[in-house]
Image (cartoon, grey):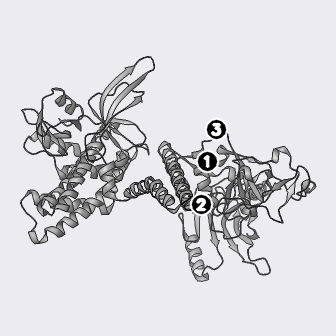
């Protein structure tokens, strides 16, 4: 049997529609549902109708095939796509798909509700940190129905009258329109009155509207007011943090939000809106929101300060006084902006915000390149590339060991250390990072784990190719296959571009502090450790000692720690250790270079100096982490 009905029969969540679908399912199986807009002459072209093909109920429900033809689509292409859908046993075509996970008979068959592509995007939302329904965050505020509640309509002059914030009053930019001549006023019950912080959404949308929900947040200036049936009003729960609500509002404004809530409908279903999944930020994303908000506020303050200064140019008694004041007062503002602008320069960021071993090597590379000594500059570029990979792989080894995840590349590093002749080098560090990028075991770590950032370093084709070219140059340099003097300048430029590609991908290191813990005092009563440390970020090891509190009593004085973007501390010993270099007497960062029979040899990341570690604890630590 084939039936032609308004689309609401199949997509509406109203009780009458669900009950009718349930009753129909008692005698019929739905095989195909086709939605079409403007398919019937003499009916408004925006009307959506549905053609459903049914078969007498069998022992098991067949898969449902859902198809949608939009106005303007090529008829021949639509026909071919529909024929392909009929032959499908699953999956999706251009205009339709097969529903294999059968919904309850009474459930809506809205086109977007069961679309595999939409469901996949819905699952992906959890990658922001978590998922909640909008109903978990907000309650619905009662609305005024202009027909049923006509007795409440008033004029603006009547005492107690409040404004109705209709759908047209809610602007797409997130603001509420000012009062107009056609603004309606009502005597609203207390339960219907809006409050500051409430969200109001348009409840009606044009067919084919490609945008998300139109949402605004109510402010004191918009009150007193109530919402009519042309809008939906939501009141956030008192315990919902601003960051969670902000991300939810940002999501509501996306087309995906309307799609998940039944974007093919003209009217917003309040029940579908309450059940709408919205992403919720994890701790790292919450902190990023806070930082961005603080940065925006600071920039707005600077703008207001500059505007105020410019507007006061002619307020002084004399031009000389005005000139002097503008120059003096504007100096600090100009210096702030110049300092902020430097952060857009990668070199400045590396020299000031990257961990000391990399920042030092980068500074030396820039100095060598500017001095005109091409051989020294070329060697410095390749050294910087190796130290970047070495440092990052040491972090990866420490984090993987802490997480209890074994890496196969450790075996090659272990063999090099035990050989005692030549320690691990460029290729070994690259192998560690390549395994980290492709390891399935590491994929199961929590999304916020810092290893996921390291996984991305060599995951892209551009960085993998840059790393390969640098590795080949390093091998040629080590085996006396020198670049000809005529080609040296070009080689420097090409190699430095490859190093820049790697450093750009390693920008996450600017958020990861390299801490040298110098003192730890545990307070047993407060269960708090008072920690003194030096943050070795930037191109110089002379930095001030700072202090912090920690709930952990297992921190080691004298050891290096990684502080990730969530401010969690990760012990780096024995992969990285820090101390004064016996050769140059400068504080340096060391990694294990070789372990001959005579003892453990450590190598400086900054200067390449090697010395024998006298402590008997080092071999035991290396055995503990599997390097011996």
- Asked if marks 2 and 3 touch (Cβ < 8 Å), the reply is no
Q: Which residue is mark 1?
A: 245
Q: Nearer the viewer, residue 324 or 75?
A: 324
Q: Residue at x 59, y 60 (%)?
A: 256
Could you tell me how far apart the alpha carbons at marks 1 and 2 are, in whole angstroms?
Answer: 15 Å
- Asked if marks 1 and 3 touch (Cβ < 8 Å), the reply is no
Could you say where residue 296 lies in the image, as x and y percent from the top left?
52, 53
Q: Which residue extends farthest right? A: 151
Q: Is residue 406 visible?
A: yes
Res 176 quadrant in image: bottom right
Could you say where residue 191 lies in the image, as x and y percent from the top left?
82, 44
Could you say where residue 504 lies in the image, as x and y percent from the top left?
33, 57
Few, some or many residues within 10 Å of mark 1 (<14, 14–19, 20+): many
Could you say where residue 528 lies in the image, as x and y percent from the top left?
42, 24
Q: Disc 1 or 2, which lies upstream in sequence?
A: 1
Q: Residue at x 65, y 44 (%)?
A: 137
Q: Secondary structure at mark 2?
A: loop
> Which numbered disc covers residue 254?
2
Q: Is residue 438 visible?
A: no
Q: Which residue extends farthest top? A: 525
Q: Secondary structure at mark 3?
A: loop
Q: Residue at x 82, y 62 (%)?
A: 183
Q: Residue at x 12, y 29 (%)?
A: 614
Q: Quadrant of the N terminus?
A: bottom right
Q: Which residue is mark 3?
A: 239
Res 503 quadrant in image: bottom left
């Amino acid at each position: 049997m084939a039936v032609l009905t308004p689309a609401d029969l199949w997509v509406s969540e109203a009780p009458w529609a669900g009950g009718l679908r349930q009753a129909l399912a008692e005698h019929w199986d739905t095989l195909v549902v086709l939605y079409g807009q403007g398919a019937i002459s003499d009916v408004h072209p925006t009307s959506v109708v549905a053609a459903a093909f049914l078969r007498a109920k069998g022992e098991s429900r067949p898969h449902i095939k859902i198809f949608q033809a939009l106005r303007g689509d090529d008829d021949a292409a639509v026909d071919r796509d529909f024929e392909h859908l009929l032959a499908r046993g699953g999956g999706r075509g251009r205009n339709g798909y097969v529903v294999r996970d059968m919904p309850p008979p009474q459930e809506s068959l809205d086109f977007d509700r069961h679309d595999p592509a939409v469901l996949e995007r819905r699952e992906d939302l959890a990658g922001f940190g978590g998922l909640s329904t909008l109903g978990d965050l907000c309650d619905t505020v009662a609305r005024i129905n202009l027909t049923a509640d006509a007795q409440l309509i008033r004029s603006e002059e009547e005492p107690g009258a409040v404004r109705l914030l209709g759908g047209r009053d809610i602007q797409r930019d997130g603001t509420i329109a000012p009062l107009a001549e056609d603004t309606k006023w009502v005597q609203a019950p207390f339960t219907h009155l809006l409050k500051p912080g409430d969200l109001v959404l348009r409840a009606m949308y044009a067919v084919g509207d490609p945008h998300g929900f139109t949402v605004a947040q109510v402010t004191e200036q918009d009150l007193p007011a109530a919402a009519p049936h042309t809008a939906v009003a939501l009141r956030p729960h008192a315990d919902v943090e601003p960051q969670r609500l902000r991300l939810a509002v940002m999501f509501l404004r996306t087309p995906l939000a309307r799609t998940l809530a039944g974007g093919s409908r003209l009217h917003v279903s309040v029940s579908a809106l309450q059940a709408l999944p919205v992403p919720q930020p994890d701790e790292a994303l919450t902190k990023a929101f806070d930082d961005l908000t603080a940065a925006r506020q600071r920039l707005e303050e600077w703008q207001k300060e500059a505007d105020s200064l410019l507007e006061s140019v002619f307020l002084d008694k004399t031009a000389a006084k005005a000139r002097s004041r503008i120059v003096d007062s504007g100096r600090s503002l100009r210096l702030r902006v110049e300092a902020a602008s430097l952060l857009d320069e990668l070199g400045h960021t590396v020299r000031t915000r990257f961990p000391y071993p990399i920042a030092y090597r980068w500074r030396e590379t820039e100095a060598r390149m500017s001095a005109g000594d091409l051989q020294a500059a070329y060697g410095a570029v390749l050294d910087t590339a190796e130290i970047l990979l070495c440092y990052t792989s040491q972090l990866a080894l420490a984090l993987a060991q802490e997480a209890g995840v074994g890496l196969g590349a450790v075996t090659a590093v272990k063999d090099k250390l035990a050989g005692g002749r030549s320690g691990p080098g460029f290729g070994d560090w690259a192998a560690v990072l390549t395994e980290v990028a492709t390891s399935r075991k590491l994929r199961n770590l929590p999304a916020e784990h810092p290893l996921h950032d390291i996984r991305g370093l060599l995951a892209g084709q551009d960085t993998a190719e840059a790393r390969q070219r640098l590795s080949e140059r390093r091998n040629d340099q080590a085996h006396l296959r020198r670049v000809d003097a005529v080609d040296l300048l070009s080689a420097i430029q090409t190699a430095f571009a490859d190093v820049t590609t790697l450093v750009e991908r390693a920008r996450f290191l600017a958020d990861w502090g390299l801490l040298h813990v110098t003192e730890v005092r545990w307070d047993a009563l407060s269960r708090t450790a008072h920690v003194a440390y030096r943050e070795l970020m930037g191109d110089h090891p002379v930095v001030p000692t700072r202090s912090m509190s920690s709930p952990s009593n297992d921190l080691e004085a004298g050891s290096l720690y990684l502080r990730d973007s969530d401010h969690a501390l990760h012990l780096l010993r024995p992969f990285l250790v820090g101390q004064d270099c016996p050769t140059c007497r400068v504080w340096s960062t060391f990694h294990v270079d070789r372990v001959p029979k005579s003892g453990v040899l450590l190598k400086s990341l900054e200067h390449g100096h090697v010395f024998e570690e006298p402590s008997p604890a080092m071999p035991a630590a290396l055995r503990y982490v599997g390097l011996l």
